[in-house]
Image (spheres, grey):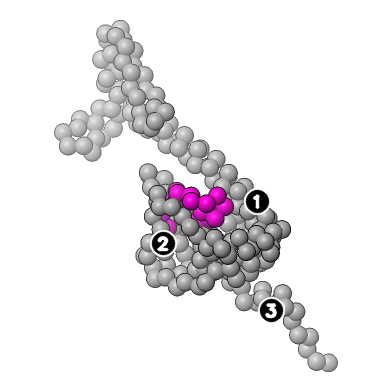
Amino acid sequence: MSPIAPVEGEAIAATLPPRAQAPHLPRQLSDAEFVMLRSAGPSRRVAAGEVLFRKGELGHNMYIIETGEVRLDFGDGLPTKVLGPREYFGELALFIGNHTRVAGAITHTACSLRVVEYPAFDHLLENEPALLAQFMRRSFAYLVASEQQLIAFLKRRNEDLMQTLWEGGASDKPGGMGIGLSVAREIVHAHNGRISVANRPSGGAMVCIEL
């Protein structure tokens, strides 16, 4: 009996890079999504350490990682994120247009990327609406979850900051005594006053002293 030839879908799947775990990580593309998006953009090979875009720039494309790793740097003391094969980034530039990049992207290792531009994305909207809608729904769900994690991280960081301010600690500023607010609180209380610390809506901390 002659061997059975693989069908087209099996042949395509055999060329795909392996997924980290089944079925796929939150930002990993399914087989169908990966084939669709990979076919929409040209290949670009990039050496390690190259800046793909910077935080604050206007975005005009998204990237699909075929091989290698890319690091996203959000700045402001936020944790960096490393993405690997079958993952993607920069998608909001195509979802909503003229979107300011919220992070910088730097190749963590040598990479092979696919770059998807506006015209190719519009073509997918016309020709693969169901699959693209599935991809966009999952992407937005991931973005909402990431925002919730960010809010929780910032809340914990603010709580730690407030605790440090009240308890004091070693100062890394020239001439600083490192006494924090603990001594200030004792001084204010000795004068029948009150001291409080709160977050400013515009950012940073606000210390109020009432005497």
User: Quadrant of residue 16 in the image?
Assistant: bottom right
Left or right: residue 198 compared with residue 192: right
| 1 or 3: mark nearer the eye | 1
Label 3 environment density (alpha carbons within 10 Å; few <14, some 14–19, many ≥20) = few
Secondary structure found at label 1: helix
Specify the quadrant that holds the C terminus.
top left
Image point 51% across, 60% down: which residue? 62
Q: Is residue 92 magenta?
A: yes
Residue 137 badge: 1
| 2 or 3: mark nearer the eye | 2
Is the Cβ of the residue at disc 2 closer than 8 Å to that at disc 1?
A: no
Image point 62% across, 77% down: which residue? 15
Horizontal and vertical percent position of residue 94: 54, 55
Secondary structure found at label 3: helix
Does residue 13 sit above or below 194 in this rendering?
Answer: below
- The mark nearer the N terminus, 2 or 1, is 2
Does residue 108 sit above or below 133 in this rendering?
Answer: below
Question: Pointer 3: what residue?
Answer: 11
Label 1 environment density (alpha carbons within 10 Å; few <14, some 14–19, many ≥20) = few
Horizontal and vertical percent position of residue 151: 50, 38
Horizontal and vertical percent position of residue 204: 36, 31
Of all residues shown, which one is farthest toward the bottom?
1
What is the magenta range?
89-105
Question: Pointer 2: what residue?
Answer: 52
Residue 162 at least partly seen: no
Marks 2 and 1, Cα distance to the nearest angstrom?
25 Å
Q: Which of these two is toward me, 35 or 14?
A: 35
Is the Cβ of the residue at disc 1 closer than 8 Å to that at disc 3?
A: no
Circle 1: residue type: Arg
User: Quadrant of residue 110 in the image?
Assistant: bottom left
Q: Is residue 188 magenta?
A: no
Horizontal and vertical percent position of residue 60: 48, 57
